Amino acid sequence: MSAKKLLQPLAAQLHASFSASGRPYAHQHIHQLLHAAIGSVSPEVDSQDNLPIQVCRDSDRQYNLYETIERAKKCLGLTDLQAVGVAEEVIEVLRAAGIGVNQVRLLLDPSFTSKTRKKAFKALCKNLDLNELGDRFVPKTATLAIAAGMAPPPKITWKDRFALAADFPIRGQSQLVEMVTRSECYLWVFPPTDHQATASASHDRYFGEQTHPSAEMGMGFTIIDSGSTRPKFPMLSKQPEETFIQYSLSAPMWFWRAQSNTWRLGNILRSKILDGAPWHNEPLSDVLPGGLKSLPRIYGCTTCQTLFVEKHSGYPDVPTQCQCGEASSTRDQNESPALNS
Ligand SMILES: [Zn+2]
């Protein structure tokens, strides 16, 4: 959904609310205030840069109160005090809707040029500005902590992300390599941010007010299995033939601590999508219209402990072979002769 479409209902809601109290502000001005608050600068800048403005449930985002006040004064001709009230109302509506820039996607998505990314993060960092004296809020997102120079950037190439995701937090075999080797699994890049089962891929938190700051960040992808059939009514002997499909998802998290100052594998967040469950039906097609077959199959190598995907035109940068050089395509071809010998 485009940013404009996403913001339209919020602009309408604010317009109605302002009008009710005798302040019929124009829609175009309200859109200016919304973009000032998000940190996407203005509708003009946003439509040029095409920033990922989304409903992000798994981020403790900060809005730009200072710039929204300034914009309200400029666009609506308000006094300082009036502008504060208007800006706070705008931010409250955005916060309730969970709408803002998906900063994890902005950091990781190669479709943004480095120039756009740099410019957008520079603007988003202004969300931390408290006043014109240079006082700042502590960032609450890992991405803004990185942009503000409080944490180093992680290595974001697919090879680096897969290497870290295949790691194990403490010791033993990698959970993800074991999982994708054991069952049929698919790589889901930038899954929807507004669904509880997939939001963690854009998880974005910075804990800067602790003695030892730390941060957690999703790697921009989740791994989904091909689903397993479950009985709809396990406690009842009747209708045993009625079933639903349970999909299991695993999203690896980056974790950073100020003491060690390196990004490593934190948790692997697990979630489920229950397609057809009688108590909580979540059709997979609602979140993934193209179905699992629209995603590349992901494999793992237990010898070198790496992850890789089948060759897929939509994912040119993702590794398609492990470090032993075993490609997914040759692997499939070799399977049958090996079984026969
Ligand atoms: Zn290997």
Image: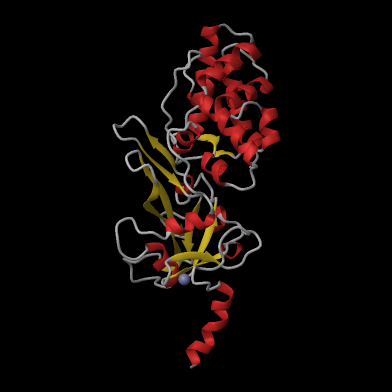
Which residue sits furthest bottom? 341
- Which sits in the foreground, 27 or 46? 46
Q: Residue 191: image x %, image y %?
A: 53, 51
* Residue 84 vertical position relative to residue 338 in the rendered view, above or below: above
Question: Does residue 2 show up?
Answer: yes
- Which sits in the foreground, 92 or 127? 127
The structure residue drawn at horizontal position 30% and vertical position 32%, both measured from the top left corner, is: 210
The structure residue drawn at horizontal position 37% and vertical position 65%, both measured from the top left corner, is: 233
Q: Residue 197: image x %, image y %?
A: 45, 51
Q: For this view, does 281 lie left or right of residue 257?
A: right
The structure residue drawn at horizontal position 56% and vertical position 72%, both measured from the top left corner, is: 327
Colour scheme in use: secondary structure
Question: Does residue 273 show up?
Answer: no
The structure residue drawn at horizontal position 56% and vertical position 19%, both measured from the top left corner, is: 67
Q: For this view, does 119 lie left or right of residue 214?
A: right
Quarter of the view holding residue 313: bottom right
* Residue 197 vertical position relative to residue 52 in the rendered view, above or below: below
* Residue 307 vertical position relative to residue 193 in the rendered view, above or below: below
Q: Residue 326: image x %, image y %?
A: 52, 74
Q: Residue 193: image x %, image y %?
A: 51, 45
- Badge count: 0
Query: Which quadrant would the N terminus be assigned to in this image?
Result: top right
- Which sits in the foreground, 218 or 248? 218
- Which sits in the foreground, 46 or 124? 124
